[in-house]
Amino acid sequence: MRVHLDCFPCFLRQSLIALRLGTRDKALQEVILKSVLEDIRSADTSKPPAFTTTFIHRRIRQMLGKDPFKEIKSEYNQAALKLYPSLKTVVEKSADHLRTAARLAIAGNVIDFGIFTSVDIEGTVRRALDGQMAVDDYGAFTNAVSAADDILYLTDNAGEIVFDRLLIEALISGGKKVKAVVKGSPVINDSTREDAEESGLTNVCEVIDNGSEAVGTMLEWVSQSFRHEFTHAQLIVSKGQGNFETLTGSEKKIFFLFQSKCDVVSKELGLSIGSMLLKKS
């Protein structure tokens, strides 16, 4: 993936979302937005969009003096936790626990306040359970899971991490050892250790961080310890569009679970916006 011209207005829109969450001071919003325009202007179009987005949100956090997504992350962790018992029952009553949990994990990917200002979680859950997947490599996924003893699971967003918990629990119940990965420090509404604790994921499996504040997973920016984990992983489950942008083309055995949420990614895949994917690398 690389930056397209269509990414530029999206960079600006994402900046506005963050600023409006972070402060009501319109003068400060204007100052920071004008400063962010320099990052947008100098975007490296040979890199994935997540590369530029990382610099944009770093500047916004520094100039605000705080994480603008902190409160909304906790809000959606709590909202997802309220749904967890009923979703767990759906998984347990289904004929194929792993497939149902995977579909729910993909449904949770709609919780993305870097892109959206509101989401319909319950509507997306219904669509994920009943609708057709645009890309469905589930057969290859089950074969890969069967062949692996250890799985590295790259989480994406807060709130969504509760849905990841369902899939991780299904993998563990199948006898797999799962190690979940969060970000090393806040960026947009991506999951950190704090979100893993709030979601209850730390009670389910080992949770590590990648030592990075980058959007997606940029291996040149992660910690040495995480790079070792990634290199030696038997199987990687990758959640979210940012991870797809930055890891697609990798030689590792990766399955990408996400919803295509922008024109650029959708066009690259030849799919419509909102498509749900369980895609083999």
Image (cartoon, rainbow, N blue to C red):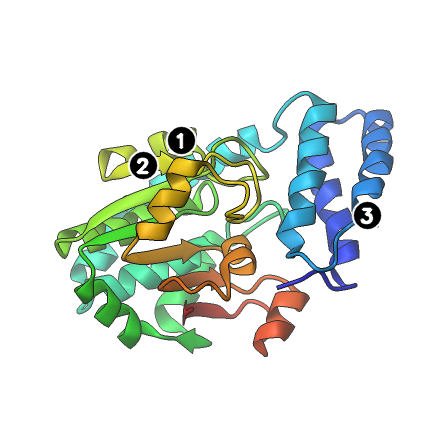
> Label 2 vs label 1: CA separation?
8 Å
Please give the residue where the numbered disc 1 appears in the rendered image.
193
Q: Are marks 1 and 3 in contact (CB under 8 Å)?
A: no
Few, some or many residues within 10 Å of mark 3 (<14, 14–19, 20+): few
- Label 3: which residue? 42
Q: Is residue 32 above or below residue 116?
A: above
Image quarter hosting the N terminus: bottom right
Above or below: residue 22 compared with residue 133 = above
Residue 101's label in the rendered image is none
> Does any portion of residue 36 appear in the rendered image?
yes
Kindly identify the residue that appears in the image at 66 percent across and 55 percent down.
49
Residue plotted at (55% across, 34% down): 72
Q: Is residue 151 left or right of residue 125?
A: left
Marks 1 and 3 sit apart, C-alpha to C-alpha, by 32 Å
Q: Position of residue 7 (x, y in %)?
A: 73, 59
Q: Which residue appears at 41% of the width and 74% of the height?
A: 131
Asked if the residues shown at circle 2 and circle 1 are in contact, with their CB atoms under 8 angstroms apart, the answer is yes
Q: Residues within 10 Å of mark 2 (few under 14, many from 20)?
A: some
- Quarter holding residue 143: bottom left
| Amino acid at pointer 2 | Val
Q: Earlier in the sequence, mark 2 or mark 3?
A: 3
The answer to whether 204 appears left or right of 31 in the picture is: left
x, y (%) of residue 164?
35, 49
| Amino acid type of the residue that numbered disc 3 sits on in the rendered structure | Ser
Q: Residue at x 74, y 64 (%)?
A: 4
Residue with the mark numbered 2: 207
Mark with earlier residue (2, 1): 1
Q: For the view shown, which residue lies furthest in the top direction?
A: 65
Numbered disc 2: secondary structure: strand
Quote the CA–CA distance across marks 2 and 3: 35 Å
* Front position among marks 2 and 3: 3
Quick check: can you spot residue 132? no
